[in-house]
Amino acid sequence: MSSTHAERDQGRPYHHGALREALIEASIALASEGGPDRVILREAARAAGVSHSAAYRHFRDREELLAEVSAHARHELAKEMSRRVGRTKDPRKRLRAVGTAYVDFALTRTGLFRTAFTAHPATSEVAAEADDGSGSPEPLEVLGRVLDETVTAGLLEPELRPGAAIAAWSAKCSTSPISRSENGRTSFRAAAITPISWPS
């Protein structure tokens, strides 16, 4: 948006310099409190101290605003995953760190977690390849990198790598263990049959 402070709404001067950012920040706070259903343009405008008509100059509708908040939530989850993955160099522990970060984020930041995948499913092409120019990775991208490391370490058979991220993500970190063959390689069972959890 323009950096001018002369933006007006119904003849009233707008006193903030970055309305779009203020609306996004207000919406993030709303989502943190009550999930995606709380992200409403009128509510965000009220929290930012402006009229709702001013908000519509920066977002076509609620869905466009929600997409911004959803992206923020996914990036927060990806950052937490990356932070925990960075604590160890062991491929198995790094994979487990992705799962525990996912679960802990869901438990401790429930509102944002529920909002994270509202705009599109985590396992969609959009989510896997999304690039909003922020340079922040998507959660599925973090998982994919760690899975690639398990292939390099000989823990996951290369032929099982395609689709492994989708299978692991869809399993939502359930309690059933990933099976291992006798040679120590990791075997991903179909999530539709037996859910996958993270190896210890």
Image (spheres, grey):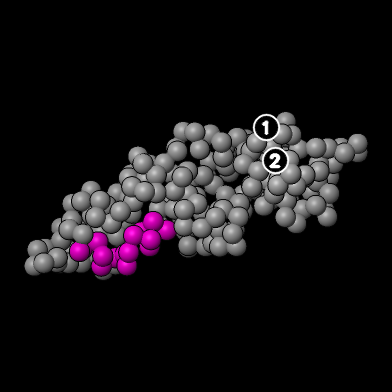
101 or 110: nearer the eye?
Answer: 110
Does residue 195 belong to the magenta stretch? Answer: no
C-alpha separation, residue under disc 2 versus residue under disc 1: 8 Å
Quarter of the picture containing the C terminus is: top right
Identity of the residue drawn at 64% across and 47% down: 170
Left or right, 77 with reference to 64:
right
N-term-proximal mark, 2 vs 1:
1
Left or right, 118 with reference to 14:
right
The amino acid at mark 2 is Pro
Q: Measuring from the top left, give residue 154's x and y in whole percent.
A: 83, 45
Residue ranking furthest to the right: 182
Residue that mark 1 sits on: 175
Q: Measuring from the top left, give residue 153's x and y in whole percent.
A: 80, 44
Disc 2 to disc 1: CB gap under 8 Å: yes
Residue that mark 2 sits on: 195
Majority SS type along the magenta span: helix
Secondary structure under the numbered disc 2 in the rendered image:
loop
Residue 150's quadrant in the figure?
top right
Q: Is residue 133 above or below residue 172?
A: below
Identity of the residue drawn at 53% across and 41% down: 80
The amino acid at mark 1 is Thr
Does residue 60 belong to the magenta stretch? Answer: yes
Q: Which residues are magenta?
A: 53-67
Q: Is residue 40 above or below residue 96?
A: below
Secondary structure under the numbered disc 1 in the rendered image:
loop
Q: Is residue 39 visible?
A: yes
